[in-house]
Image (cartoon, coloured by chain):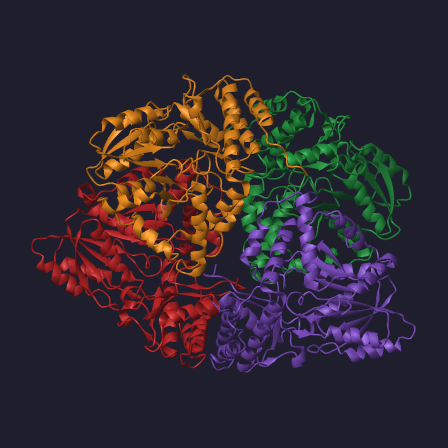
Chain colours: A green, B purple, C red, D orange
Amino acid sequence: MTPGRPFLQIPGPTLVPDRVTRAMSQPMIDHRGPKFAALLREILNGLKKLFKSASGQIVLFPGSGTGGWESCVVNTLSPGDLVLGCVNGYFSDLFCRTAKLHGIEVETLELPYGLGIPADQIEQRLRADSGRRIKAVLVVHNETSTGVTTDVAAIRQAMERASHPALLLVDVVSSLGCIDLRFDDWKLDVALAAPQKGLMMPPGMAILAVSERALQANESAKCGRAFWDWRPVLENNAAGQFPYTPATALLFGMSESLKMIFEEGLENVFNRHARLAEACRRATQAMNLKLFPRNPAEYSNTLTAVSMPDEYDADGFINHMLRRFDLSLGKGLGKARGKLFRIGHLGSLNELELLGALAAVEMALFSFGVKLPLGAGLSAAEAYLLESAPNLPST
Amino acid sequence: MTPGRPFLQIPGPTLVPDRVTRAMSQPMIDHRGPKFAALLREILNGLKKLFKSASGQIVLFPGSGTGGWESCVVNTLSPGDLVLGCVNGYFSDLFCRTAKLHGIEVETLELPYGLGIPADQIEQRLRADSGRRIKAVLVVHNETSTGVTTDVAAIRQAMERASHPALLLVDVVSSLGCIDLRFDDWKLDVALAAPQKGLMMPPGMAILAVSERALQANESAKCGRAFWDWRPVLENNAAGQFPYTPATALLFGMSESLKMIFEEGLENVFNRHARLAEACRRATQAMNLKLFPRNPAEYSNTLTAVSMPDEYDADGFINHMLRRFDLSLGKGLGKARGKLFRIGHLGSLNELELLGALAAVEMALFSFGVKLPLGAGLSAAEAYLLESAPNLPST
Amino acid sequence: MTPGRPFLQIPGPTLVPDRVTRAMSQPMIDHRGPKFAALLREILNGLKKLFKSASGQIVLFPGSGTGGWESCVVNTLSPGDLVLGCVNGYFSDLFCRTAKLHGIEVETLELPYGLGIPADQIEQRLRADSGRRIKAVLVVHNETSTGVTTDVAAIRQAMERASHPALLLVDVVSSLGCIDLRFDDWKLDVALAAPQKGLMMPPGMAILAVSERALQANESAKCGRAFWDWRPVLENNAAGQFPYTPATALLFGMSESLKMIFEEGLENVFNRHARLAEACRRATQAMNLKLFPRNPAEYSNTLTAVSMPDEYDADGFINHMLRRFDLSLGKGLGKARGKLFRIGHLGSLNELELLGALAAVEMALFSFGVKLPLGAGLSAAEAYLLESAPNLPST
Amino acid sequence: MTPGRPFLQIPGPTLVPDRVTRAMSQPMIDHRGPKFAALLREILNGLKKLFKSASGQIVLFPGSGTGGWESCVVNTLSPGDLVLGCVNGYFSDLFCRTAKLHGIEVETLELPYGLGIPADQIEQRLRADSGRRIKAVLVVHNETSTGVTTDVAAIRQAMERASHPALLLVDVVSSLGCIDLRFDDWKLDVALAAPQKGLMMPPGMAILAVSERALQANESAKCGRAFWDWRPVLENNAAGQFPYTPATALLFGMSESLKMIFEEGLENVFNRHARLAEACRRATQAMNLKLFPRNPAEYSNTLTAVSMPDEYDADGFINHMLRRFDLSLGKGLGKARGKLFRIGHLGSLNELELLGALAAVEMALFSFGVKLPLGAGLSAAEAYLLESAPNLPST
């Protein structure tokens, strides 16, 4: 048992703020009673604001982001359908794999790890699809395996330029509540998320926002589905209930986490993530390390993927960090296995926690044998945080 | 906000003991790290003891009992398969419905609400299935909608007498940790449960025990599946991980809840449930009410379903109870809608809590206009609890 | 470890409501910073409302009611001073003993246990004190050892009739927040309390309300004092601080407990205590037991002291109750040792919890060998609670 | 509400580890029952180990360190007694003031703030006291106002060289559980402490260890006392109880905090404090700041007092820090008002938390206008923490 408070810098689940933990500790209530109905109403409204959606519907399941993929696929598609799956990392690959497991034909647009999805290639492919066989485009907004954010608004614009009717199905697991996301403006059809990232909660849910068109697709989609079906959820929600036993404790926590986000202000939350991310990037670069993502415009504000210098083993370093500081970093996944480490800086996090974590990175690299000027990373982070600091509130 | 501690007598979710709540409040950990692996190992071992299984495998999902039905169906069956679905209440009906939604042909053995599943009828039907078309028998061990417990051991014996190879798929959601359940002895193929009943936890998971035969069925089953597939779970579990982000906080709670059950002693837990249930039955009968289940041998020890006298509206009474005592009871579901109320007495509950709840029932009935001798119910419960009390530990 | 939620029916400390427990779990703050100052301001205002005082000052100490006695004495009196100590139970005796230990001469007005303090005897004694030697009258508002409430307003009236300038120093430990108490109207000089009774908190503080006259007495009082001196507390409080390190976690809890009391409504809180107390009295009398207090007008609404039938040992019964139900009752103290048991029904308590506790009393008496009609006590309590129930809120 | 976890670097109260917070959340128990007696026994044993005492007695009060001073004084001294009060800071001054308020004559040995108490001066004064009028020597082990640790073992040796029978009364509030302290070896007569420092708890108690000689002094000491008297506590403790209502929730926390200390190992706890303190000192010196204490041998491992450069206002800086990072530092107290700031690094704290806090100091100084090389402080701290790191446990 390490003394003091633990640090946890995987890109989610993150440490849960004590307010959320305490909210989750409330006594259980009847999930078919009026208190529950009021709680649910409040949460659905809050989530709509979080997704920036007036027109979409929120659908909640006890589950996980993985379950969110399944729910997205089985509600909108039928076995044999063709979709365009954009793969630029481990999680986008799994998203597509979920579709394949349900008999969907997935044509993949494969990008090297470290790049976002180029809207023009989508446009090109859709223009070529004169028979309109492609039923949906699958994209991950923020590829948690590589620290790359794709410009989803641009993809929607590309689809519009191609005048293609495909649905736009987007994994926003690690962007919701961290990075700007506009369900209505970007005309998303499904955006699927999870609570253990920007929502600062323990994992255990799938959170979906679905458009009117997606709901129509649900009527004709032929994938076998029972648990993940949206219709019974929406019907029951209208009466303040669920067709399954909901994860009440998590919903208590979600109500509090939404309160915290809106107290801080959603744009302030995005700005805080942006500042912490830039500080982290400057720090790691000042440690003579290279960022894994290739285009600065696509750097993620949720996590930073750092390339391990060739002569060192990334996983060995991550284990060293864990033994030395009891601090977990994200490992390289899929094609990036062993090549990088990922620093999460999302959710309930402040400057001082980030600086403590960066000190751990610096010291663990040093004691792992990587040559670097001690303090350079922290100094770079400090300088940026000072220069970018918002004005203090007047007293 | 009602003063004092709330009572919650729906048949699950139940009030969570403070030890479990506190355990759930521990700081989040890396779900791919060594602490998590140790936690998982401990939980899987504890659950095997709880299912009384040495041979089965435990498979966990963030989800619900409803999700457990889906996982059970999609891992063992293929569209077009024929199964024998035993329906004696609302939840057994939904279990069968889940199979139908995945393209399974369900032949139902329908019993009136209030009866258990008769083993001889199963035997008869299976003997008639000379072509061995029936792939599985679906049963709910404890029908939470009617308060009826089916003799599952007898059903397995009937299947053996018929020498039929069908799988035995059993919903044990509201029996696990409340009523004796023997996965190995009864040769169950799938037993699916949820944490918010005997495990005294908040809802949010599906818990399955699966036999070797069920695992073999998984290899040939053709239902579309991704999230609910057992194989990736079992493979990842071997390395102390999951193929999805697990519901870490719930797992913290489950570790504590299993500790509590084994500290009390599993057989003591069953006996406590049996005593509280019998006290509840005697109390309600002394209030001049009729039990909904027809056969004393099938009375559930998890909950008591009480028939509302014809001249009164059960749901109106339940609402009256909620307004008067902030105490939720279970409503009648499906064909029993409006005809009964259900008193949960499961999980973390003691004699004094039960007596408080029974006092609420007595007083609420009285003030709702039902004629009854005040105190008669409580007196009957007290008398039984006194005569059946275990010996006090010597000091 | 007994399953289910514990019952605790000593007359304080009582079970702490989960809202207060969660509030106490907030992260520590600087006790010299602005957040603390705001917290303190809010608490002092709330306590004034609780004491029904606009003119008095609140003085808080980490400590206990016992410490409150000391603070009361050393701030208002000097060694050699004469006071009139009203003794009608164990705690009033200790209050006087505290004064004696500081060199105060205590003339006691001794009443048999079970009676309140008669105002006319006070008047008589004060009239006889023509030299005005008596500096203060010491009274316990609610004698927790006997379950007797003294009419303090009447005592003040008696003092006024005698035109005597003595200070009125009152222990309100087990009345504050349970029984009506009017610091200003009754012209109390010191009222000292503790948080583990009506305030529903864990113990660990002394809470005093002090009048202008008491503050003047502080200037001339010569008892040695440092920690318990009011002046530095009041001076520091003006700046939002304390002269000692305050019990921050308890103050977090107190802020929440005051919120809960005023949400329910102070008069509603008193009425709830009165109803539960009367229900308890009727129940114990229906069990063929005698109440220990002699005058119905002096029955305490905080606790009920019940005489043990002569042929039984009260402490033996209390131990039996603890072994059988893990439920603690209050023992007889001082001259009442072994003669009675005390049932606390104060703080965060509702009808159903009380009925559960009364069931425990009934069953434990029965199994201890006391002859009583099982259910009679509960039936009497139920009948009273039904007939005295406030109207339900309209939906 | 600042996002993320708060930092609190006053030299106590410190942030409470979540294990202690959760332990404090357990349901209240009867303070006169057997569970409480077992809890108390365990705590008293643990505290003896913490004080390194087999011969002393532990005495606990709900209260504070300030109350501990009073308890120390009134149990061992009589009005008119002469004591030698060693004053080298704000808290030692208040300790002496407590004695004066009880009529004790205090001859002070005054040292400039920033120095420890020189043993030879004590020896000299005691040798001169041929009439043995001096009844006690009052010392603060760790002066929290200046960050200076006095060599108490040397003082005892000086007293022995002078063959003087005075009692040695020591305030160990901010050393217990942080800095080595040996009650038996150093022949202390009273060591008084509080829970909100090395014990990692919320404030609200006074903790004393008292020697056989101090207990004898209690028999003849004539200061008025009731609440703070040791005798009734020790007598009641023998039966597992207290003469006052104990602060049960804090005792729950203390049981857990002692477990945590002994799990880590008491010497490891001291070493951790020493390492973090040295890192803090090197960091602040690398920021071109001067330490307030004058002798390196007397640097405290609990907190670091840093002199504010003359041209800056220390309190202004502290306020700036609070506004900018929501992080509280200790202000200068007494004669040091406005001259310094104090960084607490005690209790439940690890390297990364310290580095985060030091980053805050560096950045806040910079933005307050103090010229310093950004990153220099952190780099110095990192280098020291790396070179002084204990060997990692082998896997």
Q: Position of residue C114 (x, y in %)?
A: 26, 69
Quadrant of image for the C terminus of chain A = top left
The quadrant where residue A124 appears? top right
Residue at position x 84%, y 65% in the image:
B104
Quadrant of image for the N terminus of chain A = top right
Closer to the camera in the image, B170 or A159: B170
Closer to the camera in the image, C127 or A207: C127
Q: Answer yes or no: is residue A217 visible.
A: no
Q: Position of residue A73 (x, y in %)?
A: 79, 50
User: Looking at this rendering, what residue extends furthest in the left direction?
Assistant: C130
Residue at position x 52%, y 77% in the image:
B381
- D137 lies left or right of A251: left
Q: Answer yes or no: is residue A161 visible.
A: yes
Q: Position of residue D310 (x, y in %)?
A: 40, 17
The quadrant where residue C223 appears? top left
Instruction: Name above or below for residue B143 compared with residue D57.
Output: below
- A328 lies left or right of B278: right
Instruction: Name above or below for residue C196 compared with residue A185.
Output: below
Numbered circles on residues, count: 0
Residue at position x 41%, y 56% in the image:
C200
Instruction: Name above or below for residue B147 compared with residue D332.
Output: below
- D395 lies left or right of B108: left
Closer to the camera in the image, B294 or C326: C326
Q: Position of residue B316 (x, y in %)?
A: 56, 72
